[in-house]
Amino acid sequence: MSAAVSTQKAGRIELDDIAIHLPGKVRFEAVRNITTTIAGGEFVSIIGPSGCGKSTLLNAVAGYLQPSNGRLRVDGEAVSGPGPDRGMVFQHHSLLPWRTALDNVAFGLKMSGVGRRERRERAEEFLQLVGLRGFSDRYPAQLSGGMQQRVEIARVLINNPRVVLMDEPFGALDAQTRERMQQLLLGIWGRLRPTVLFVTHDIDEALVLSDRVLVMTHRPGRIREEIVVDLPRPRPEDISVSPEFIALKKRCLALVQDEVRQSLVGGLEVARIELPVEA
């Protein structure tokens, strides 16, 4: 199916009382009692203090981590491991340096047994979709950071996933490139409409992109509040200076700052308990 005409609406994510424990010298609870539903085609961002379990939750939806409690389903099917219905975009690209942009994008199709001509045609289509017409023969080292992430996004989208999981994909980019990538992502999402679950530390980015923002508590991470981003789509480029945007930003910022304060207080209390008492 052509990238420009896909109308897929699947990709419903259901998390029911999810808890995730991570191994280590001391096994600890990273995420606790997460219950929420993300509709097919919805764009949802997750924000919260550092270490609150945002990426852990994303990895569970991807199938890389198994919850220690609760049920996690995509379109009614239990998530038991990674699958082609879910594509993952990380902060740092995972492109193969010895393959061209086109071959990186087409690699998943090659592994699926798609013929050379078809996969090259589709890879060219998706490179065009992310604004990289004419860069097919470039290697990752010959591309800027923003271009590398465009190739990475095309590499994920060409497999037609129902769900796209993005873990701070623009975090390593400069401010101007980041804004351009946000607009590019919104344009692609508007045409293909996969479900997007997007982790970011940037409140402005979350509000510019999302239908809803999930604000997580400090560890063990729980959903403190779900904020509906009732702003017009397509989002105008000056949306961040609107009174409605500013009010939402203040609300998100207050919630995150409160959680950071609570985590610091909790850390100090633990330190007091663990420090030896001088004679």
Image (cartoon, rainbow, N blue to C red):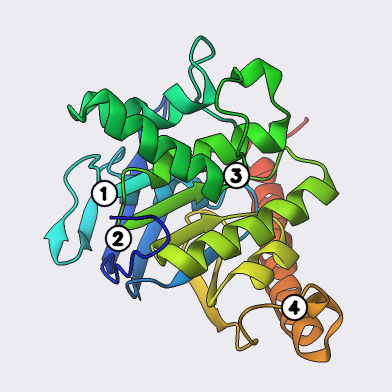
The residue wearing badge 1 is 67
Q: Residue 125's x, y, as percent?
A: 45, 44
How far is the residue under mark 3 from the one under mark 1? 24 Å
- Image depth: mark 3 or mark 4 in front: 4
Q: Residue drawn at (52%, 36%), measured in percent from left and top?
A: 152
Q: Is residue 70 left or right of residue 24?
A: left
Q: Is residue 184 left or right of residue 71?
A: right
Q: Amino acid at mark 1?
A: Pro
Q: Amino acid at mark 2?
A: Ile
Residue toward you, 45 or 56: 45
Q: Residue drawn at (38%, 62%), measured in percent from left and top?
A: 194
The numbered mark, 4 or 1, whose residue comes first in the sequence reads 1
How far is the residue under mark 4 from the one under mark 1? 39 Å
| Residue farthest to the left, as pictured | 77
Q: Residue 187's x, y, as percent?
A: 58, 64
Residues tagged 2 and 1 counted as in contact (Cβ below 8 A) = yes
Q: Is residue 27 visible?
A: no
Q: Quadrant of residue 199?
A: bottom right
Residues tagged 3 and 4 counted as in contact (Cβ below 8 A) = no
Q: Amino acid at mark 4?
A: Pro
Q: Residue drawn at (71%, 32%), measured in percent from left and top?
A: 145
The residue wearing badge 2 is 18
The residue wearing badge 4 is 236
Q: Quadrant of the N terminus?
A: bottom left
At label 4, counting other C-alpha atoms closer than 10 Å, the crowd grade (few under 14, some 14-19, many 20 or more) is: few
108 is higher (above) or lower (below) than 100: below
- Image depth: mark 4 or mark 1 in front: 4
The residue wearing badge 3 is 169
